[in-house]
Amino acid sequence: MAGIVVLLSGSGSNLAAIMENELPVKFVMSNNSKAYGIDRANKKKIPSFVQSDLKILELHVTKLCLSNDIDLIVLAGFMKLLSPAFVAAWKGKIINIHPSLLPSFPGARAIEQAFEYGVKYTGVTVHYVDEGMDTGQIIAQEPIKIAKNDTIKNLYGKIHKVEHKLYPKVIKNLLKWKLIKAY
Ligand code: GRF
């Protein structure tokens, strides 16, 4: 059966949503040994691998993808920029979720920046990964209205709620329709 690899660095709430939707997560990988996402994978008995050296981590992901039936590499809060060589090797098979309406507010502080800027709408983007920071082709977006009485805290909550629905849905469709791009 086809499967996916999830790369994460933190809490892994998107991984939890992906697992709850019974998507075929075969491996979970992280650069951060303290990532709670690794505990979530272990609880579900999904094999995991932690490696802080990005080159070694990429090699391991490559090996796993080559020796298993992996359709998609899913970044879910993975806070490292993948190397151009790795991205080129797996182009069209790596996707990411980002908490803004790209191309606005790329990078690590997207939610805060949108809030501080005072935009009326922010949102969530799922995109293919290229060599840049949050610059790959957009697959799906969902807007979120920032209400006058929203705080940064509840905006986080709103964004995560949308992410947890949108990401599993997009992954499901990509696997179902084999829309994974072959360049
Ligand atoms: C999400 O907001 C995602 O958009 C961003 O990193 C965050 C990861 O959250 N890329 P979690 O680790 O899945 O809870």
Image (tube, helix red, strand yellow):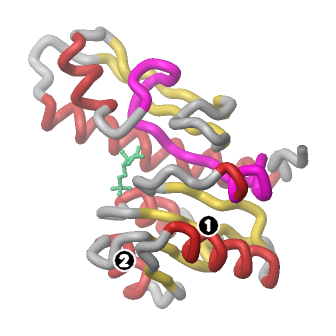
Give how far apart the Cα atoms at labels 2 and 1 are.
Answer: 15 Å
| Badge 1 density bin: few <14, some 14–19, many ≥20, Cα 10 Å | some
Of 114 and 3, the residue lying toward us: 114
- Image coordinates of residue 152 in percent, x first then y, are 15, 31
Residue at the image position 43 percent from the left and 49 percent from the top:
164
Residue at mark 1 = 23
Mark 1 residue element: loop
Q: Nearer the viewer, residue 23 or 15?
A: 15
Of the 4 image quadrants, the one containing the N terminus is bottom right
Lower position in the chain sequence, tag 2 or tag 1: 1
Q: The residue under label 2 is which amino acid type?
A: Arg
Dot 1 amino acid type = Leu
Q: Are marks 2 and 1 in contact (CB under 8 Å)?
A: no
Task: Residue at 58%, 36% (x, y): give it.
Answer: 132
Residue 105 lies in the magenta stretch: yes
In the rendered image, the quadrant that contains the C terminus is top right
- The image quarter in which residue 35 lies: bottom left
Vertical relation: 81 (above or below) 121? below
Question: Start and end of the magenta stretch?
Answer: 86-106
**Residue named by callout 2:** 40
- 154 lies left or right of 143: left
- Establish if 72 lies above or below 55: above
